[in-house]
Amino acid sequence: MSSLKKTPPFTLVKSLLQGFDINDRINHFMLENVAPDIWRTSPPSGKGRTIAEIAAHIHNARTMWLKAVNYPSLPSKLEGDEYSPADVIKALKQSQAGLKEVLENSFASDGRVKSFKPDAGSFFAYLIAHDSHHRGQVMMLSRQLGHGFAARVGYGMWEWNSR
């Protein structure tokens, strides 16, 4: 008999869902490190969203997808100008949990997501790409406003093994 410890088999769905969780924690890490004095500062061009609006948009877009798939308990959208980074993080946790459940159910059944084609794997990729795009916008806008993120934050956003 072999004394080698058997490793459980790799499970793609479990890995994807873990990556989805980490992606959300990267969002939190970034928002926790936004300079407070630029949270609602307009872009230098005068056009486009503030960092607060970009962060709210990530959550609100997720909420739109939850509505599209008839998720039973929609989180509240972020509107107005009273929400803080902590409020956005709390909202992101809610929308992420709902979408994770949608992904879990889709991966465990026929791989389809209502109102999204072609399939749940593509929906997963879409969600990650959407968040990543807006993280890039926040990073760029922070720099443009003279409050770029410290190197530990910029590099820390790529440390998926510790988030």
Image (cartoon, helix red, strand yellow):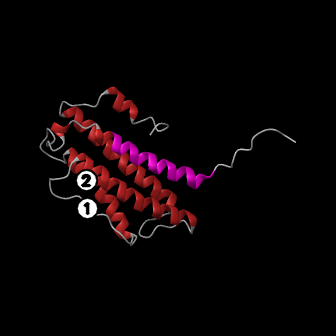
Q: Residue at x 18, y 46 (%)?
A: 50
Identify the main secondary structure in magenta: helix
The stretch of residues the image draws in magenta is: 11-29
Contact check, label 2 and label 1, Cβ < 8 Å: yes
Q: Which residue is mark 1?
A: 77
Question: Would you say 87 lies left or right of 40 here?
Answer: right
Residue type at mark 1 is Lys
Q: Residue at x 25, y 46 (%)?
A: 85
Q: In this orientation, which residue lies closer to the viewer: 154 or 32?
A: 32
Q: In this orientation, which residue lies closer to the viewer: 86 or 18?
A: 86
10 Å crowding of disc 1: few (<14), some (14-19), many (20+):
some
Residue sitting farthest toward the left: 46
In the picture shown, does residue 7 fall above or below 155?
below
Asked if the stretch drawn in magenta spans residue 15, the answer is yes
Total number of numbered discs in the rendering: 2
Quarter in which the N terminus is drawn: top right
Q: Locate residue 10, reporting x and y percent.
A: 65, 49
Q: Is label 2 in a helix, a strand or a loop?
A: helix
Q: In this orientation, which residue lies closer to the viewer: 124 or 99?
A: 99
Q: Which residue is mark 2?
A: 56
Asked which quadrant contains residue 149, the reply is top left
In the picture shown, does residue 94 fall above or below 38?
below
Q: Locate residue 141, reporting x and y percent.
A: 23, 38
Q: Locate residue 119, reporting x and y percent.
A: 50, 63
Asked if the stretch drawn in magenta spans residue 31, the answer is no
In the picture shown, does residue 122 fall above or below 84?
below
Question: Would you say 109 lies left or right of 8 here?
Answer: left
Q: Residue at x 57, y 68 (%)?
A: 109
Residue sitting farthest toward the right: 1
Residue type at mark 2 is Ala
Quarter in which the C terminus is drawn: top left
Q: CA distance from mark 2 to mark 1?
A: 8 Å
